[in-house]
Image (spheres, rainbow, N blue to C red):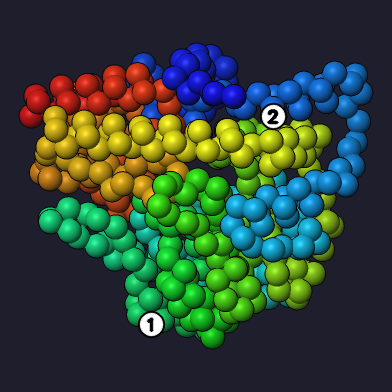
Amino acid sequence: MKYNFDEIILRKGTGCVKFDHPDVGDRLPLWVADMDFATPPFVLDALKERIAHPVMGYPMVPSDYYSTISRWVKDLHGWEVSPEYIRYIPGIVKGIGMVLGCFFRDPAREHQKVKVIIQPPVYHPFRLLPQKSGFEVVFNPLLPIEKDGKLAGYRMDLEGLEKLIDEDTKVLILSNPHNPAGICWPKEELQKLARLCAQKGVLVISDEIHAEMALKGYRHFPFASVCDEAAACSISFMAPSKTFNIAGIVSSYAIVLNPELREKFFAYLDSNEFDNPSIFSTAATIAAYTNGGEWRKQMLEYVESNVDFIEDYIGTRIPGISILRPQASFLVWLDLRSLGLGHDALVELVQDKAGLFLNDGAMFGEQGSGFFRLNVGCPRSVLQEAMEKLEKAIETL
C-alpha cells in the first residue's frame, strides 16, 4: 500500500496542542513533536474494532502485548528483551517522575539532597520536572562540533561529567536519540557514558521515544544494550507514539534489565496502578508493532525528503541561516545565530514577521539561544509555505 503523506488534514479546532494552544494564534504551527500525518489505517482499524464492542469496562493486559513489544524491539534494534522486563507506563515524562519518586523519595530521608544531571540543549521537561519536584538539576552541556564555521553536531562532555559527579549525584537523564539535535549517539560514546555512570553509582534514565525514527545511514543503539554496565545502571523508556503519530493515546513502556532495579520499580508501578494500560493503548501498540513496518519505512522516507527540501531551500535561498541535519526524528535544529540578532529579536522575526510558531531554542537551555526547533513531520506544501514566510521575513532585515 502506498501511503499519502501529502494530504492536508485540518487539525485546528480538534483540541490538539499543536494548533489550538492559545499562544499559536494565526501562526503556522511547526512546533510540538507530533506529526500532521494521518494515524495509520491499521491502528485506526484496531481502535474501531474495539470501539465496536459496547462495553468499556476494566481491561486486562492482552496476553500478546508485551511479547509483541519484545518482538518489535528485537526486529528493529537486534536487542533481545524478555517480555518480563517490560512494563507499561503512562507517558515518558511521567515515567521520569516515577523513577525519581520510586528511588529517591524516601520518607525517612526527606531532606536527602539528590542531584540530577542533564545535557543541554535538551528536551526541557528534563529540567523542569526535577526542579519542580525539589531535586537539584546540574548541567553538563553538550560540546558543539563545528565544520566550515557551522554547527555540524554535538558530543558529550564526558570529562566534564566525571568532574561534575559527586556523592549527591544520583541520576543522569539521557536523550537517546537526542532531542532537539536529532543525534543517534554512537555506541562507543554510550559505552563510555555507561562505564562512568556505573562506576560512580549514577542511575541513567534513557528517554528513547525517537528510537524507531533513525534516518537513512544511521542506527539507534538502545542504551541498555551497549554493554553490561549500561544494562546494570539504567532504566529505558520507549513508545510507538512518535513513529505512528499516536501521542494522544499514551502508549509508553519501560525496559529494565537490572533485576534489583526492575523489582523495585515494577513493584512501585504496580502498587500505584501506573502500569495499567487503557484498552486503546494496548490495541494501538499491538496493531502498530504488528503491521507497521511498511508504513514506518514510507513515513521515514517522506520525512527525510522533507529534510532534504529544507536543507536545499535554505542553502540556495536563505544562505544566512543553516540547519543541523537530524540523524533521527522529524525535528530539525535551525541555526539563526549568523543573523546577528538578539534572542527577543529572533523570536519576533520568526513569530511575528514570518508568522511561524516554532520551538524557541532557548527553552532547551541557554545553549539553544539563537536556534529554533522546526517540526518537518507535515505535508511538503506546508513546509514550502513556511520557508517562503521565513525567507520574506529575513529579507526585511
- For residue 346, which quarter of the picture? top left
How packed mark 1 is, by other alpha carbons closer than 10 Å (few <14, some 14-19, many 20 or more), is: few
Of the two numbered discs 1 and 2 in the rendering, the one whose residue sits closer to the viewer: 2
The mark nearer the N terminus, 1 or 2, is 2
- For residue 289, which quarter of the picture? top right
**Figure quadrant of the N terminus:** top right
User: Residue 261 versus residue 293: which sits nearer the camera?
Assistant: 293
Q: Is residue 51 above or below residue 284?
A: above
Q: Is residue 45 above or below residue 132?
A: above
User: Residue 94 versus residue 2: which sits nearer the camera?
Assistant: 2
Q: Which residue is mark 2?
A: 43
Q: Is residue 146 above or below residue 198?
A: above
Where residue 263 appears, x then y in whole percent? 79, 69
| Residue 308 relative to residue 187: left or right | left
How packed mark 2 is, by other alpha carbons closer than 10 Å (few <14, some 14-19, many 20 or more), is: many
Where residue 73 appears, x then y in whole percent? 65, 54
Q: Identify residue type, mark 2.
A: Val
Q: Is residue 10 above or below residue 285?
A: above
Q: Which residue is mark 1?
A: 163
- For residue 358, which quarter of the picture? top left
Where residue 107 appears, x then y in whole percent? 73, 70
| Residue 178 relative to residue 345: left or right | right
SS type, badge 1: helix
**Figure quadrant of the C terminus:** top left
Where residue 176 appears, x then y in whole percent? 49, 58
* Residue drawn at x 60%, y 68% as measured from the top left: 224
Q: Is residue 235 visible?
A: yes
